[in-house]
Image (cartoon, rainbow, N blue to C red):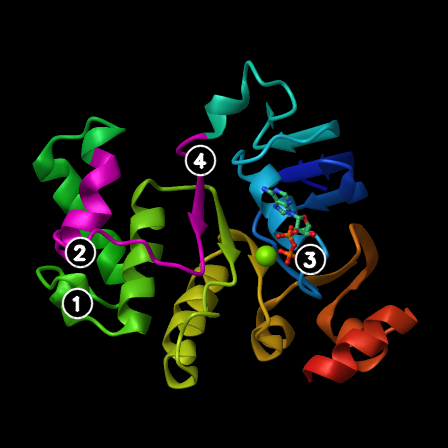
């Protein structure tokens, strides 16, 4: 059994008087694709934000690649080891696809522009957009823009990728090209934690599905178990609404 890439134990989080994460314990093994599902407001994004160091927990321990994120003095060490993709692509409109992908490499990682361009092109290649490197976001479809955002995250060569509803803002016909890129990363062995409403993706690509309900992990298992034979009535109810 290899060491977990991510380990949460007894993580709690409140916003004001509302406890949004109650007692989350969860491990992700290297190379695993973990998919988080659950109703809006159940705490999925908060879990992802805590795992990626964007949000601090109130209690519990969070280890990501051996960095104790619960230790605020060390939480910055995770920068550059994780990549995050959101619903909104947030590309700079006045920068080309390649310019967007290389920005952090030049500004934060202090790479030379030649080195940044080399890495940036490799990342664009990985999402199938090398030939669009000089296009501006307005010249790209929503699906292509999101693939650029994935390339931007990949360019820092992260060990873990987080996706928070990466396809939710896309027209239905553009979802497939993005989930296909995500599937490719999974096949290449990337450790991934994915929040999604795409149950087809969860079924086909997840190694494990976690169903969250009101700040707790209500049920988890391999896709066949969760989708074909859910044990928890809350899981059954949720799936009957989304499938
Ligand atoms: P999900 O991603 O499953 O929809 P979230 O993790 O975004 O759920 O939110 C869980 C709960 O926490 C929701 O009730 C939400 O309104 C609340 N919440 C999330 N972020 C904040 C915040 N920054 N300030 C206040 N409440 C928040
Ligand atoms: Mg969310």
Q: Mark 4 points at which residue?
A: 81
The picture places residue 8, in percent across and down from the top left corner, at 72, 37
Identified at 43% across, 30% down, the residue is 79
Category of crowding for the residue at label 4, using alpha-carbon neighbours closer than 10 angstroms: few (below 14), some (14–19), many (at least 20)? some
Q: What's the distance in space between the residues labelled 3 and 4, CA to CA?
A: 27 Å
Identified at 17% across, 56% down, the residue is 93
The disc placed on residue 41 is 3
Q: Is residue 206 left or right of residue 222?
A: left
The picture places residue 19, in percent across and down from the top left corner, at 78, 41
The residue at label 3 has a CB less than 8 Å from ligand 1 = yes
Mark 1 element type: helix
Q: Nearer the viewer, residue 36 or 160?
A: 36
Identified at 42% across, 77% down, the residue is 175
The disc placed on residue 215 is none
Q: Which of marks 2 and 3 is nearer the N terminus?
A: 3
Circles 2 and 4, Cβ within 8 Å, touching? The answer is no
């Amino acid at each position: 059994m290899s060491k977990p890439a991510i380990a949460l134990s007894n993580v709690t989080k409140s916003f004001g008087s509302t406890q949004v994460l109650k007692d989350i314990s969860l491990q992700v093994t290297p190379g695993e694709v973990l998919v988080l599902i659950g109703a809006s407001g159940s705490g999925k994004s908060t879990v992802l934000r805590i795992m990626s160091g964007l949000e601090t927990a109130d209690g519990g321990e969070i280890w990501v690649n051996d960095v104790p994120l619960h230790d605020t003095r060390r939480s910055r060490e995770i920068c550059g080891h994780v990549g995050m993709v959101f619903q909104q692509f947030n590309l700079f409109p006045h920068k080309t696809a390649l310019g967007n992908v290389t920005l952090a490499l030049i500004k934060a990682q202090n790479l030379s522009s030649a080195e940044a361009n080399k890495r940036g092109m490799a990342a664009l290649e990985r999402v199938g957009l090398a030939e669009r490197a000089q296009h501006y976001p307005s010249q790209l479809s929503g699906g292509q823009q999101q693939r650029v955002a994935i390339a931007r995250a990949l360019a820092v060569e992260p060990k873990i990728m987080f996706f928070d509803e990466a396809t939710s803002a896309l027209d239905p016909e553009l979802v497939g090209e993005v989930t296909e890129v995500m599937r490719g990363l999974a096949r290449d062995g990337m450790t991934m934690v994915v929040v999604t409403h795409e149950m087809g993706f969860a079924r086909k690509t997840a190694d494990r599905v976690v169903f969250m309900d009101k700040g707790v992990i209500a049920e988890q298992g391999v896709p066949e178990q969760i989708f074909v034979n859910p044990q928890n009535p809350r899981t059954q109810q949720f799936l009957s609404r989304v499938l």
